Image (cartoon, helix red, strand yellow):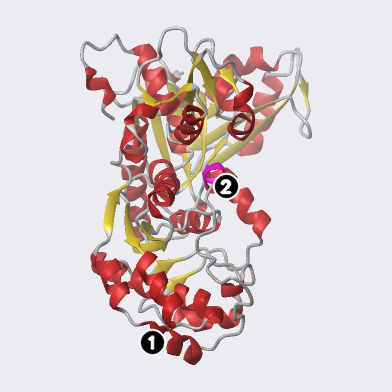
Amino acid sequence: MTARHESRNSSDAPTGAVRALVRLSGELSTKARRTRSRFQKQLAVNLRDGFAAAGVEAKLRPDWSRFYVDAADRDFLEPLGRTFGVSSCSILAGECEAELDTIVEVGRTLFADSVRGRRYAVRARRSGSHGFSSSDIHQRLGAALNPGATVDLDEPDVTVFVEVRDGRAFFHEDRVRGPSGLPLGVQGRALALMSGGFDSPVAAWMALRRGIRLDYVFCNLGGRAYERMVVEVAKVLADRWSYGTRPRLHVLDFGPVVDAMRARAKPAYLQVVLKRMMYRAAARVAEGIGSEALVTGESVGQVSSQTLSNLRAIEGASSLPVLRPLLGFHKEEILERARLIGTHELSARVREYCDIVPQRPVTASTPEAAEAQEAAVGVEELDAAVAGAATHNLRGLRPESMVGASLYVSEVPAGAAIIDTRPREAFESWHWPGAARRDLAGLERDFRDLDRSATYVLCCAEGIRTAYLAELMQRAGYEAYSFLGGTPRMRRLLREPPAESSDRDAL
């Protein structure tokens, strides 16, 4: 019998702790061998980038049908659960050679205590050629676990999973879902129009899930404050969902373009012309960086510019294909997906700057009418906006450069009250000793009830969301800060010795 720790074949794997089995998206198994090999190589690159970005110690061993992870602790599950191409992951309780008697003995040893006095089921899956079936594992291991426990195949308290693949058998109890989809980067490159509201980040996420590498373009109608909010939204997509890539955000000053439109186009057509101008500018940026398509957050019928007639009138302004992942979504579906992605709370405070028609916008434009109105405006201001675009390297962008260093701390001041704004499950998994948990939305509404004499350190998963609230609290007279780097950096701070210099302030 071969125990789990004896079966590892990576001499540099982290010692002591966790081994996991990673299942790949089912879509990969449908690809031709050469394509699948390319996709799986990209997935391995993306996973390693995710582990590095999260600062976790983990070693990845890719195999044809499964990947394996050896790690110091379970922290690797967070970036793995946000890597497209991963279907699910299970922490292994043990493994052994694929021989029936050995499987039964190892399974009994591993799970006898956890099933004792409870209802249990054994689920087995087998791949490859063996002298036994999955039913044999069900019957033999189920019987071995039976004394002191009750078999219940419908509603078990404990499910013992056994996966047999060629020469090995793997045991586990849990399964952590991944986002599935295709590995990011295998389907070319596109440019997503970003407004910072709910729709465009969700559309971008759905394109990322289909393996499309994204950069972003933002046509700014609201000045620096609006830009900062959009950067924060785009940075969530970049930091949390774009492993293996380095997305950039191109910011265009569209204020002069709108001024020209108001002066030269018919008011009812302003919304349609604005969208055409944005498409035209985005296509030029996209062609300059080698993107093959545009991605937008449009959904049929959601606003006046998104009627079928108006979408037809707008699309001709782009020299590239326009992808609309949300075409058939209704608003509640979009909001639900935004919560899953992690952009909902940020998008909720972004006001609608693109609505520039005071009343009675045209809802059934034609391509000819829209083109005529756009021609009346001209392209001089548009040319200047494209030429003057500013570019942000989103994953390399430091939080303090987005808002201001005075909003951040990288150490916990003595006597400060720590407020953790992550979901309850994440808080209960780990939090700074003595921290209190508060929902970000509720805290934003009720922070004025807090003691004004205290010092507050706010933390979240990324170190971005709480910066906005810290700014609000400072304006209201509170001494409040956002913790630089979020809870991942707080965890590292507890493990590291005190720094002798200010180097730890750098991301």
Q: Is 331 above or below relative to 503?
A: below
**Residue span colored magenta:** 342-346
Residue assigned mark 1: 375
The circle drawn on residue 348 is: 2
- In the image, what residue type sits under mark 1? Ala
Q: Is residue 51 above or below residue 453?
A: below
Q: CA distance from mark 2 to mark 1?
A: 35 Å
Q: Element type at marker 1?
A: helix
Residue 426 falls in which quadrant of the image? top right
Residue 493: % across, % down: 36, 16
Residue at (66, 37) in percent of width and height: 135
User: Label 1: how many residues lie within 10 Å, few (<14), some (14-19) or many (20+)?
Assistant: few
Name which residue lies at 52% across and 74% down: 271
Labels 2, 1: front one: 1
Establish if 262 lies above or below 37: below
In the image, is residue 88 part of the stretch drawn in magenta? Answer: no
Residue at the bottom extreme? 368
Overall secondary structure of the magenta stretch? helix
Would you say residue 343 sits in the magenta stretch? yes
Residue neighbourhood size for the residue with mark 2, other residues' Cα within 10 Å, grouped as few (<14), some (14–19), many (≥20): few
Q: Residue 312's spot in the image, x, y percent? A: 52, 82
**Total label count?**
2
The location of residue 487, given as percent across then percent down, is: 44, 24
Depth order, front residue of 472/67: 472
- Residue 290 seen: no
On the question of residue 141 being in view, the answer is yes
Residue located 46% across and 32% down the image:
471
Question: In the image, is residue 480 above or below residue 333?
Answer: above
Give the mark nearest the N terminus, 2 or 1: 2
**Residue 400 lies in quadrant:** top left
Task: Name which quarter of the figure residue 483 lies in.
Answer: top left
Please name the amino acid that badge 2 sits on.
Answer: Ala
